[in-house]
Amino acid sequence: MVEKTDKLRIALIGNPNTGKTSLFNALTGLRQRVGNYSGVTVEKKIGQWGLGDTQTVELIDLPGTYSLSAKSIDERIAVDVLSGHMEGQPAPDLVIVVVDAENLQRNLFLASQAAELDVPMVIALNCWDVAERKGLKIDCKLLQQRLGVPVIPTVANRRRGADELSAAVLEAVQSRPKMIRPSWPAPVKESVELLRNELVEKNDETLKDGELMRLLFDQNSAVRSRLKTPMVEVEKIVQSARDHLRSGGFNPDAAESLLRFRFLNPLLLDIIERQANLKKRSRSEGIDQLLLHRFWGLGIFVGMMYVVFQSVYTWAGPFMDLIEGVTGWLQGLAAGALTNTPMLQSLVVDGVIGGVGAFVVFLPQILILFLFIALLEETGYMARAAFLMDKLFQWCGLNGKSFVPLLSSYACAIPGIMATRTISDPKTRMITILIAPLMSCSARLPVYLLLIGAFVEPRYGPSIAGAVLFAMHFVGALLAAPLAYILNQTLNKGRPAQPFIMELPPYRVPRVRSISWRMYESGKDFVVRAGTVIFAMTVIIWALLYFPRPAELEENIISQYSTSSEEEIAQEIDAAYLEQSYMGRFGKFVQPVFAPAGYDWKITVGVLASFPAREVIISTLGITYALGGEVDEESKDLREAFKRAKWESGPKTGEPVYNLAVALSIMVFFALCMQCGATVAVIAKELNWGWALASFFGLTGIAWLAAVAVYQITIRLI
């Protein structure tokens, strides 16, 4: 069903690094909403744009793409939206193609492809100020005459040209200008006509010329997947059309680029006058010689990443303490107000408020990490970093496009997995998704801090403790590389990664508004996507930890600890109930599986309770050791409880449970295991539930093996 709306719908499309999203933000301000396209997790951004004084239109920010080849999900979305085949989305009334004034020829390639979809068009010639500074002069009026559509110079980050663009769009909505198209040679026309006769007319498909060209020119075009015609028949028809084109003297895989640029080149004659500022250009090249150096460039990158992550932890600390303080204060208020209803009190305090606090507490780290990511992207360094990483990724079947998703996963795997939609090769994208959870996200940090503070720092000092904390963030990354190699050998049959092609954008001064908006969107995305799942899982875990609650158990504890304070008795009651809960019983049942890693039943319960969200282990251990669920990673009482803990049964009865070997084993397990229900759900949406469950159980098995190995080796060395 197509949603009905009286508002005009205008789509923004453009190459990456053309300032398309900056223009979208400038035109819509805060009147935006973000959601997902139906059936996929690719984001759609829709905003309200006021044209003139009276009319408001709906502006759609399509994913940035270099072409409409429809191989990646982003390209498929762009084609489907522009052609009106996106479920629930009518075709736009007009498309604004955002073109980088410095790269006119290449950017107009995308505009030429969009023109084949028969949509009215306006071209926003963006980054006009940068082109002027570099001595480029473009005759916009002549270009407009030759293309047949309005061409408006803009500077998105300063809103220059916004009024002129509004006026041009208002007029174009009425006149419906369409960009001139190439005059295709006979073999192309005949091949397209063959596709039209066999698919559109015989099988009642609704395809425009541009979509038929996608089937003709692109290998394994994603357009095929939404056709009603059986796939076997589609393959035969498309192959017949491609064979016909080949018999006419054109290679189907290269013909489009050759013919479109042959069409565009004459149109751009006398359009551009160059008076290049060689001094500025050489300065940029000089910076690149250092940042892209195979030795110094990599060293600078590693040093920069170290500073980034150290800053994340240092700056986020006070804000996390504040959130934890507010959470504890709210829990205290709720506990006092619900003293007469113990079950409701526990649900609200531990399930609802504790569940919300469990994910909100990590928001400062995510915001700060995305602050740095936005800074790296805004300045142009992120593309250079991806170029550097491409050389390191090639051996395991990945390329530089995997770098940004994996880096983003250090904050949270969810936005990292979402970022893989820019990877056109489906197998490379799948491998990147499957290894993204191995990047040490911020939820693992409390576990590291708790155990390092208890067992590493007191024994080896703060410098070694800091080194261990830094090293723990790369345990998963070290495993990810060989795992990606194995997956590439099995899923991709050892095929090398596709060549990595990425434009190196010019160095720019970061824009505060753009960075702030990026942080807001990332924080909102984390709260909505991850927070809802974590909250639901926390409530479920609460139930498993709360029930059953036999009344006689409380009476026995009261009589046993009659001389203790009320607070101590309450904590002992909570610990006893947890031991008798469904989760406690299950933890005791599976404890022998974790015994080779040095875990007793209490650690096992903490591990099991933390599968929906890793950080839950701290509050669970707090309850287990009769300290209450309000403890955090800096709790001295919890660290002391670790040191006093003794084995309650088995051959180690009476011996200390915790030591350095157990601490390292737990940290390694948490570094590798996928203890995040939200991440599993996102993988299921991106791939399917089969891969999501395989990833969950696979990483859990790997984490168990690594934890056992670390414990068995370390216990023999200490």
Image (tube, rainbow, N blue to C red):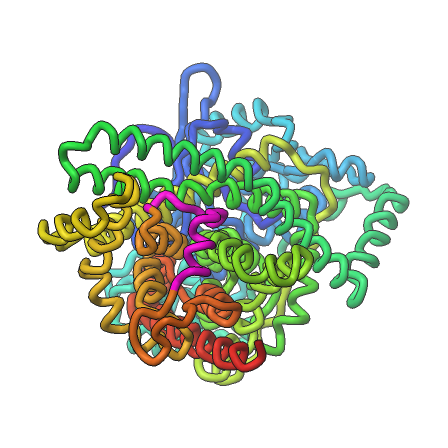
Query: What is the x, y in percent for residue 536?
Result: 26, 48
The magenta-colored residue range is 628-645
The residue at 72%/37% (across/down) is 509
The residue at 82%/49% (across/down) is 284
Q: Answer with the quarter of the image where residue 437 lies.
A: bottom left
Observer-nearest of 234 and 289: 289
Tell me how many marks there are.
0
User: Along the horizontal axis of the image, is 21 left or right of 678?
Assistant: right
Q: Is residue 522 above or below residue 553?
A: above
Query: What is the x, y in percent for residue 513?
Result: 59, 31
Q: Answer with the quarter of the image where residue 718 lies.
A: bottom right
Query: What is the x, y in percent for residue 338?
Result: 19, 31
Query: What is the x, y in percent for residue 403?
Result: 59, 61
The residue at 37%/77% (across/down) is 652
Res. 607 in view: yes
Is residue 380 part of the magenta span, yes or no?
Answer: no
